[in-house]
Image (cartoon, rainbow, N blue to C red):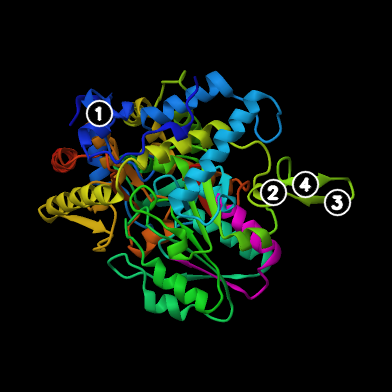
Amino acid sequence: MTTSPQSFDLRTRPFDTAAIRADFPLLARHVHGQPLIYFDNAATTQKPQVVIDTLQQFYCHYNANVHRGLHALSEQATAAVENTRHIIQRFLNANSANEIVFTSGCTHSLNTLALAFSQRYLRAGDEILISTMEHHANIVPWQMACQRTGAILKVIPINDLGELDITQGLALLTEKTRLVSLVQVSNTLGTINPIQALITAAHAHQIPVIIDGAQAVAHLPVDVQALNCDFYVFSGHKIFGPTGTGILYGKQQWLEKLPPAFGGGDMIETVSFERSTYAQPPHKFEAGTPNIAGIIGLGAAIKYLQQFRFADIEQHEQQLLLRANHWLAQTENVQLIGNSSHKVPVISLYCEDVHPHDLSTLLDYEGIAIRAGHHCTMPLMQRFNVPATVRASMSFYNTLDEVDIFFTKLKQVRKQFQ
Amino acid sequence: MNPDLRALYQETILDHGKNPRCFKIIEPHTHAKQGFNPVCGDQLTLFLDVRDQHIHDISFQGKGCAISMASASMMSQALKGFSIAQAETLFQQFHSAMTDVNVNELTHPKLKVLLGVKGYPNRVKCATLAWQALESLLKSIQGTSTTDVVCTE
């Protein structure tokens, strides 16, 4: 008997952190002899047992290619992949499953859009609007598109709290703007951006909007129809799914209009040496064999997450943030980068006395996994005039005790380094 | 500190990390090169005053972790007065000692303390940052390099 993701119980589970932690086998391990505190969730999240089991079930029982084999295994694999498409559709509240394109990750989704838009919609002098707090994945593909087309990149500034300057953002929407691509939640600052206002304003100028939801989907509910964004992208591995999976949501009319970025099998209707015709979306954007196991695993991850109410997740995560802020208020000589009152539990710190890289190593030997560096947001580091930060990024399976241990150890290792 | 970290953060390294020697801009200098580690964002600039194919003076400035600052500091002290050829030899020795698992020899006694970094593979690039900038400068002195910034990647 094989399990496909639709067989999960959909009743809402009570929010019990201990029970949730028991679902994630990796959280039980020790690192350098200490119980692991995993605070690097903005980089990647851990996987619940059900996702790991789903991958194993696939490879043990129905591994086959999709959309081509007429045999039982292929039919089963195809059904499971398409089932995930429906799971994602409901998760994002998309109008149709055909608006869900599978990619290898958020970076792949954004590059696909940059390639597609530069083939047809971008001309010399056109403007693409992003913000100071974008991840490199939402900067570099657009710079490359600008190089190809002669378009110009415009950047919405942020204030000292690490929030978008909406007034300046609105002023940057001009008759030359062709596209807005914005991060919903900053991976470095944790800021939740008021994207709704910018989407509405952009649409008043008939400008399409792409939302990078990589850091949002594991923390807050997303409704693409309510947001009315034209595209929404995220990575599977940041929402408890396997690496190498990603989603590109696009409104049907956009996916129909946009040319495909990549060619190959699966994305065509007919091929001859004179010309080929393309499949309808979403397959038009899915050239080649997809990450079949990963996609099915992602379906399992989303179903797992949907056992909980986002209100419970948000409440717990806000408690983690509150506790962290309480500690920060009594921690000396530390600069918190990202002080918005509206943020997910991401704490980006800069201590003058110990370099982030050293702090990361020192904390690693206390069993604490955090990230040190620029977090793929170099322009943002420049904006705050710091070379790097130490970032503790939490998830719904983290506990208040872990926050306490983190700050206690932080104080300890800083002292030892003096 | 966790005892398993003692080999990485030895007293000498912590001392050089906190109070780096040769930490200034020498004027006049004949050569300067920026080194950059894109993984962590560390950057430093190395300055050389080369006269008659010898390193008459050497200094650096920048921001970085204890390992990268200490390595740059100790390297600068070691190289003062070296000929370009001697500097190149030391670079080759240091580079293979840090990156080749089979090489654990460093003839320069004061630099040996940096070999402890080898036990922490994700910190090796911190220790080699200044040396990469040096190698790039030596190449440009010998007329074989034109890059402005050298990267550890």
Q: How much space separates mark 3 and mark 4, taking CA atoms?
A: 11 Å
Chain assignment, label 4: A
Q: Is residue A415 above or below residue A62?
A: below
Q: Is residue B22 left or right of residue A17?
A: right
Q: Which label is found at residue A262?
A: 2
**Residue at the image position 72 percent from the left and 49 percent from the top:** A279
The lab-note entry on whether marks 3 and 4 share a chain reads yes
Mark 4–mark 2 CB contact (< 8 Å): no
Label 4: element kind: strand
The lab-note entry on whether marks 1 and 3 share a chain reads no
Question: Magenta segment range?
Answer: A109-131
Most extreme residue toward the left is: A330
Label 3: element kind: loop
- The answer to which of marks 3 and 4 sits earlier in the sequence is 4
Chain assignment, label 3: A
Q: Which label is found at residue A275?
A: 3
Q: Is residue A2 above or below residue A409?
A: above
> What residue would you read off at disc 4?
A269
